[in-house]
């Protein structure tokens, strides 16, 4: 979908969905697909965190496992892209750095940064949140158990970025990666919570059993 943003021509709207994806599950995939449809996105890039800022490093599975599970889960959808830039870049993974790199790579695209209601409320404490909103529109999706900030709440904190917010409906699936990890550790089924190829990978590599 072509158009103009700030006087420049854009050829596509492109979604960005980041996270630890430990593991990727059906809620991640459904959110990406429904936001893509609602906002007319040409595609969505899944960007797994390298060294996460908000979680202790020892609590997160090795990057190669999280990356491979994402690749397996998205293999059947040609408009889903897995981008390992944060893993390759090394060091702490900050969204502003990722969006800066993507803006340089995709100068003709308008970026849509997809975040949960929980993450949206934390945005004022992130590194360079104003710069994040310069680089991408913020797409807020609801998450069970968290109050979704409304436009007024966001505009109060970012008064000069008021036109940079979108709100999308998302499936209330209630999935959480922590629950899936706990189920695996307890020997319980995760069928229908993650794609079968992801469940097979978790079993094959013995992930989450020690937790």
Image (spheres, rainbow, N blue to C red):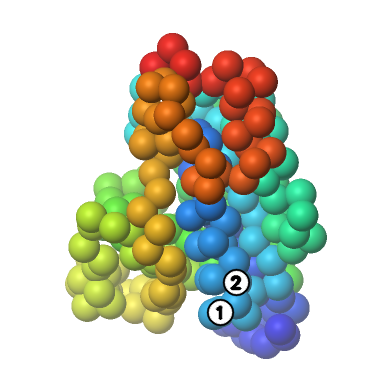
Mark carried by residue 36: 2
Decide: is 206 above or below 13.
above
Q: Which residue is drawn at 48% across and 55% down?
A: 27
Give the secondary structure at mark 2: helix
200 lies left or right of 119: right
Rendered image quadrant of residue 160: bottom left
Rendered image quadrant of residue 173: bottom left
99 lies left or right of 53: right
Q: Which of 38 and 155 is in front in this view?
A: 38
Q: Which residue is drawn at 61% across and 23% down?
A: 203
- Label 1–label 2 contact, CB within 8 A: yes
- Assign the C terminus to one quadrant of the image: top left
- Assign the N terminus to one quadrant of the image: bottom right
- Mark 1 surroundings within 10 Å by alpha-carbon count, few (fewer than 14), some (14 through 19), many (20 or more): some
Q: Nearer the viewer, residue 191 or 11?
A: 191
Mark carried by residue 195: none
Q: Residue at x 24, y 67 (%)?
A: 149
Q: Which residue is drawn at 39% across and 44% down?
A: 176
Q: Mark 1 points at which residue?
A: 39
Decide: is 46 above or below 53.
below
Residue 178, how many percent across, how many down?
37, 35
Residue 44, how many percent across, how many down?
64, 61
Residue 68, how many percent across, how many down?
69, 33
Q: Nearer the viewer, residue 81 or 195?
A: 195
């Amino acid at each position: 979908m072509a158009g103009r943003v700030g006087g420049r021509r854009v050829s596509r709207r492109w979604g960005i969905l980041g996270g630890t994806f430990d593991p990727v599950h059906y809620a991640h995939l459904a959110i990406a697909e429904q936001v893509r449809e609602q906002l007319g996105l040409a595609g969505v890039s899944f960007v797994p965190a390298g060294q996460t800022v908000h979680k202790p490093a020892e609590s997160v599975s090795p990057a190669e496992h999280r990356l491979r599970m994402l690749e397996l889960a998205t293999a059947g959808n040609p408009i889903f892209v897995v981008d390992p830039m944060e893993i390759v870049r090394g060091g702490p993974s900050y969204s502003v750095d990722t969006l800066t790199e993507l803006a340089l790579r995709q100068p003709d695209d308008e970026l849509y940064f997809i975040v949960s209601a929980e993450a949206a409320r934390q945005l004022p404490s992130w590194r360079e949140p104003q710069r994040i909103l310069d680089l991408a529109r913020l797409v807020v999706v609801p998450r069970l158990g968290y109050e979704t900030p409304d436009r007024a709440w966001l505009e109060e904190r970012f008064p000069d970025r008021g036109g940079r917010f979108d709100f999308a409906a998302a499936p209330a699936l209630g999935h959480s990666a922590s629950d899936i990890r706990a189920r695996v550790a307890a020997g319980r089924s995760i069928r229908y919570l993650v794609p079968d190829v992801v469940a097979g990978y978790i079993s094959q590599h013995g992930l989450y059993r020690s937790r």
